[in-house]
Image (cartoon, rainbow, N blue to C red):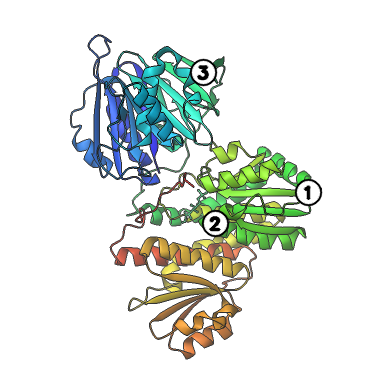
Amino acid sequence: MCGIFGCISQQSQNLIENTLQGLKILEYRGYDSAGIAYHTDNNLQNNSIKVIKSVGDISQLAQKLKNPPKTNICIGHTRWATNGTVTKENSHPHLSFNDEIAVVHNGIIENYQSCCDFLAMNNISLRTPVDTEVIPNILYLLHHNKHNIHNYLQGQYVFCATGNSETELFLAKKGNLPLYIGRNNEQTIFITSDTLALPSNTTEIIILEDLDTCEITNNEIKFYNQSKPVTRKWQPFYQSFIATDKNGFSTYMEKEINEIPAVLQAILTKYHTDKNITSLRKQFHDLLKDVNCIHICGCGTSYHAALILAKIFERDLRIRTIAHISSELSPQTILSEKSIGIVISQSGETADTLVCMDVLQQKQIPIIAFCNVTTSTIAKRSQITFPLLCGPEIAVASTKVFCAAVLVGCLLVKNYTQNTQAEFLKTTHQILQNARQILPQPVSRPDKIFIIGKDIFYALALEAALKIKEVTYLHCEGYPANELKHGPLSMVDNNTLAIAFGNDTDNAKAEIEARGGKVITITNHTNNPLEFISQIIPAQTFALDLAHSLNINPDKPRNLAKSVTVL
Ligand code: F6R
């Protein structure tokens, strides 16, 4: 989905290159076009704003910017089209009618039509059908009153603007979308909608609050909330220890699958030794004392982690626990006052999950987040956030974060002995090493793939099927093993491949084989109660290899984005 990156410095520097580097990191979020705007001259009399845009990837934009000039202000954007087709004109930055103000924007301006009417009354007509274009024009009309901008725009948005007669960046935020300001020790200020894009030497950040506006000049930052001056504090920032490059692997998906043992180890260590986490755990168990129902919510892979944890929590805590697809939890859902909500999210920015949090919060239900991006909106809006400690996950298909979320949930409700933990890590390494023998590629491409399992292995089957669908575009269905005979068995023929998770699927396997289908079983190596978490690895590797054999880039499957910030 869309991404914002920009920088401002006292002296002219290579800020265009910095912006292109920032945009390159934002690529993983999914986008279809990109652009930048920069100031041509430090001296306001000669200054103008130059905009360069291009459809396609950042390398195409970079082609147009060989030997870029030095500048002291540059803003950039990756666009994932929502309204207005994918064209160079529709990509950001958008300019005011007189080319004096440039804007990059994430989110949706819901009162777009009334903004157009307001601009038409002021004889301003627009060049594109993109909602963003109203922003620089309204800023132009507001002139010195630009901190009132939120009174003119409805919806959830963040944007960054710069004008050619001003030496500043102007930021605004309404609603849930994130916008961060980062600084290093070299007097350069960065702005971004995703902290992953901040340079590694960033030392501190500020997170904008709802209804904030902010002016950043080269020596001062001023914050306002609903037009009144406010203070926002710098917080220390630590870029993740896991590198954002591919570390020798040909794809991020492969790299991230290979990071699973290290991530699980980091979680086991930190969740047993870190004082902060011990204190969060205590707060969590204090909350549980008065609770008769737990609602665990998430989308896609995070929902599958929720499904597994709902079974485990119910069993181990003896508290009714329900897993919800975030977008299916509605104000009509029965939620007792003695409930708690748990939201699971890799990105911490998923719009469907944020709306689900609104529903929970309207009923005053405390929310606990399991989140990989701990600076995210979901983390910020939760009472307690348990970090998933995975470092950046760049591939669109989530792999390591799934395993991390399930392990964190297990550790919160049960104590595992040192031996159990050590055996779990050893088995995880073995499963990773042998993934391709455990689940080999089919000799010929199957027409249909079924993945079956019972109980938590059914949730694992759903997750494996989602991975295969996402990166191979083949139809693949996760099914409860015993349900097959209640309908889908009619589809099984000798072009069917079935993957069976767990030990309890013999009848279903026999029924598939009797109709010509091929079955591969993924069973336990040990009796370790955590081993099931690592059994997803062969399915992830299977999806990855199948994608390669079909010439699909598994890191960027068509039509999908990493962080889904639209409803
Ligand atoms: C699948 C996948 C998605 C996400 C879903 C929720 O591989 O990555 O299904 O799990 O979009 O995203 P988060 O976890 O960021 O809330």
Looking at the picture, which amino acid does disc 2 mark?
Answer: Cys
Looking at the picture, which amino acid does disc 3 mark?
Answer: Phe
Q: Is residue 466 above or below residue 296?
A: below
Give residue 274's position: percent from left, percent from top.
65, 41
Q: What residue did someone put label 2 on?
A: 403
Q: What residue did someone put label 3 on?
A: 223
Name the residue rendered at 52%, 66% in the picture. 462
Whole-angstrom CA distance, mark 1 to mark 3, is: 39 Å
The residue furthest front is: 121
Q: What residue did someone put label 1 on?
A: 338
Whole-angstrom CA distance, mark 2 to mark 3, is: 40 Å
117 horizontally vs 97: left or right: right
Whole-angstrom CA distance, mark 2 to mark 1, is: 29 Å
Looking at the picture, which amino acid does disc 1 mark?
Answer: Lys
Pointer 1 local density, CA inside 10 Å: few below 14, some 14–19, many at least 20:
some
Q: Quadrant of the N terminus?
A: top left
Asked if residue 201 shows in the view, the reply is: no
Which is more toward the observer, 457 or 153? 153
Q: Is residue 473 above or below residue 50?
A: below
Question: Which mark lies nearer to you, 2 or 3?
Answer: 3
Query: Which comes before the other along the chain, label 2 or label 1?
Result: 1
Query: Which comes before the other along the chain, label 1 or label 3?
Result: 3
Where disc 2 sits, the SS reads helix
* Image quadrant where residue 77 sits: top left
Give residue 400's position: percent from left, percent from top.
49, 54
